[in-house]
Image (cartoon, rainbow, N blue to C red):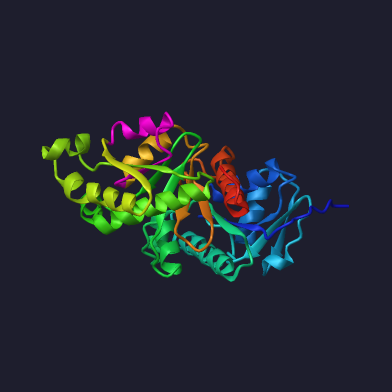
């Protein structure tokens, strides 16, 4: 007889990600590695998830559900809320419109559940931007889909690990576009979200450091004036609002200072400025948190890894970290 597991709250939902990537595998690995933590559901394709279980020689079964309320949290049962039904699993490690559409449908279904209040939060497995585009869905990533469905609210990416937290002013765009988009409203929005996000993680009065855009934070105007005319005034505005913000700080040293606990969160100006220090410290413990949404969303800090998909070697550690952050955020506990 299967052992039933008591769930004291609504379940988290984990989207399957691109079915041709490592998403289904790392979800199943997390499921198998945590036998006493099963109060969650997968949103995705039951055939894809069954294939992932079979590939890992698991005797666990897929239970298809139409609503979270139908889930049965029993040992050896993976609850899959059906968002798509492929006739056959897409080939692993290959970009396809079918995979892109299935990944997108899973995301949209999870968003609908979160907005309806039938799940406690969303953890998203990786998607592939080319697959989305092949399906006619021209989104740079999860964040833009989530922001659109949340009604165009201000959102930001927070990347976090055990040592540092980073919030981005601009996300998925060219460096040329990032410079244009990093204006005063974008700066103040990012600083406010960094402050709010750090508080949600249990930090009472977050120390927010804002990185400069130019080398040496502009060196007093010698290398650019964005720090003087845009970033500095945004920091001053945040301080008037009661936020413990400082900067602009040189981008080549501010992350080191954050790691030394001088700051609680760093606002980075563009994608690679913020993600390189996070990813350099290792992908296993990195997590992406979307700030500004009306529900909790986290994800692992890596992609679909088509090069290793289907080989049975994918590491679920970052997904597990994202799952743990989602639990803590929805419990109101500190991270």
The question of residue 256 being in magenta is answered with: yes
| Position in image of residue 125 (x %, y %) | 53, 52
If the image is split into quadrants, where does the C terminus sit?
top right
Can I make out residue 98 in this image?
yes
Residue stretch rendered in magenta on the structure: 251-270
223 and 110: which is toward the camera: 223
Q: Nearer the viewer, residue 253 or 191?
A: 191
Position in image of residue 97 (x %, y %): 44, 62
Image check: 268 left or right of 100?
Answer: left
Question: Could you tell whether 41 is left or right of 199 in the image?
Answer: right
Q: Is residue 224 left or right of residue 163?
A: left
Write the residue at 59% across / 40% down: 312
Residue 54: x and y in percent read 68, 48
Count of all numbered marks drawn on residues in the image: 0
User: How far from the left and from the top, in percent, is residue 113?
Assistant: 59, 67
Q: Is residue 16 left or right of residue 71?
A: left
Q: Image point 46% across, 44% down: which residue? A: 205
**Identity of the residue drawn at 70% across and 58% down:** 9
Looking at the image, the residue that sits furthest to the left is 222
């Amino acid at each position: 007889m299967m052992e039933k597991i008591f769930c004291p709250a609504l379940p988290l939902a984990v989207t399957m990600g691109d079915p041709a990537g490592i998403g289904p595998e790392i979800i199943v690995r997390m499921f198998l590695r945590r036998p006493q933590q099963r109060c969650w559901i997968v949103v995705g394709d039951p055939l894809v998830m069954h294939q992932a279980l079979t590939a890992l020689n698991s005797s666990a079964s897929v239970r298809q559900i139409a609503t979270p309320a139908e889930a049965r949290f029993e040992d050896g049962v993976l609850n899959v809320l059906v968002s798509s039904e492929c006739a056959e699993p897409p080939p692993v490690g290959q970009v396809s419109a079918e995979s892109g559409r299935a990944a997108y449908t899973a995301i949209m279904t999870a968003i609908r559940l979160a907005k309806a209040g039938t799940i406690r939060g969303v953890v998203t497995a990786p998607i592939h931007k080319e697959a989305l585009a092949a399906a006619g869905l021209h989104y740079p990533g999860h964040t833009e889909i989530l922001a659109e469905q949340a009604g165009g609210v201000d959102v930001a990416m927070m990347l976090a690990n055990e040592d540092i937290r980073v919030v981005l002013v601009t996300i998925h765009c060219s460096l040329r576009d990032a410079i244009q988009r990093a204006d005063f409203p974008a700066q103040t929005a990012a600083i406010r979200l960094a402050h709010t996000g750090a508080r949600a993680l249990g930090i009472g009065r977050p120390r927010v450091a804002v990185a400069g855009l130019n080398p040496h934070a502009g060196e007093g105007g010698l290398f650019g004036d964005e720090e003087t005319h845009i970033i500095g005034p945004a920091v001053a505005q945040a301080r008037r609002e009661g936020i413990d913000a400082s900067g602009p700080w040189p981008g080549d040293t501010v992350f080191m200072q954050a790691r030394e606990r001088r700051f609680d969160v760093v606002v980075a100006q563009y994608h690679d400025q913020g993600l390189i220090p996070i990813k350099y410290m290792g992908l296993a413990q990195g997590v992406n948190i979307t700030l500004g949404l009306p529900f909790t969303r986290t994800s692992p800090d890596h992609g679909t890894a088509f090069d290793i998909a289907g080989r049975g070697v994918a590491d679920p550690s970052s997904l597990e970290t994202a799952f743990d952050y989602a639990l803590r955020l929805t419990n109101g506990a500190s991270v």
